[in-house]
Image (cartoon, grey):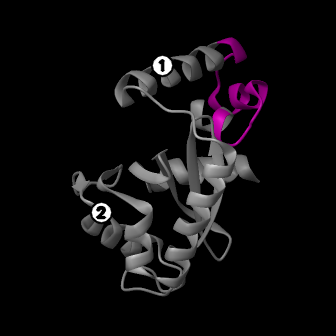
Amino acid sequence: AFVMHDVFGTPFDAIAESLGRTPATCRQLARRARRKLDEASGEQVDVSSMEHREVTERFIAACAGGDLEALIAVLDPDVWGDSDYGGGVARGASHVARGVLRFWSGLPSNYWRHPVTVVSQPVGKQMALLGYIERELVGVLLLDIVDERVVKMFAMGDESKLAFLSAQLR
């Protein structure tokens, strides 16, 4: 309910129909998710839309070109990243950047046969990046940005979650 509403702007009535719940229940689910995210992430800093745009444009350009050094320059030296597809938490700009490019590069890789196209989507105080291959959603990357650097990120690649989100985007 949270992702559908806050990330993709789906009205609660439509979310309720998809989930088989009432709109009030879906609003409550989204509110609880927001509160848990706020508690889990500690103090969040509002990032201006200009800073969002600049950082995400550099991040996307680095991914599109498979440019490791440019991506490292966008990341905080102590950045950490996690995902819903396992592998544990990655720490440090170099390690995180290599992982990002493995899955999110705009160049064909050993992981994907086709390049990933990345587009940005603001989500409250965070920036979300949506990764597509040939118009199919293959991942969502949530970024926390502080002082023009990405300080943490979370990648969503679970096929069932992405299928649900893709259906909502259509």
Q: Which residue is mark 1?
A: 35
The numbered disc on residue 93 is 2
In this rendering, would 85 be left or right of 70? left
20 is within the stretch colored magenta: yes
Which residue does the image show at 55% across and 19% down from the upper left? 29
Query: Where is residue 20, by image quadrant?
Result: top right
Say which of marks 1 and 2 sits in front.
2
Asked if marks 1 and 2 touch (Cβ < 8 Å), the reply is no
The image shows residue 4 at horizontal and vertical percentages of 64, 37
Q: Position of residue 17 (x, y in %)?
A: 73, 28
Q: Main secondary structure of the magenta part?
A: helix
- The local secondary structure at tag 1 comes to helix
- Quadrant for the N terminus in the image: top right
**The magenta stretch spans which residues?**
6-24
Q: Is residue 162 visible?
A: yes
Task: Tell me which numbered mark, 1 or 2, is placed earlier along the sequence.
Answer: 1
Judge from the rendering whether residue 78 lies leftward or rightward of residue 62; answer left or right: left
Q: Nearer the viewer, residue 162 or 67?
A: 67
The span from disc 1 to disc 2 (Cα, nearest Å) is: 28 Å
- The correct choice, above or below, for 52 with respect to 41 in the image is below
In the rendered view, does 155 fall on the left or right side of 124? left
How many marks on residues? 2
Kind of residue at disc 1: Arg
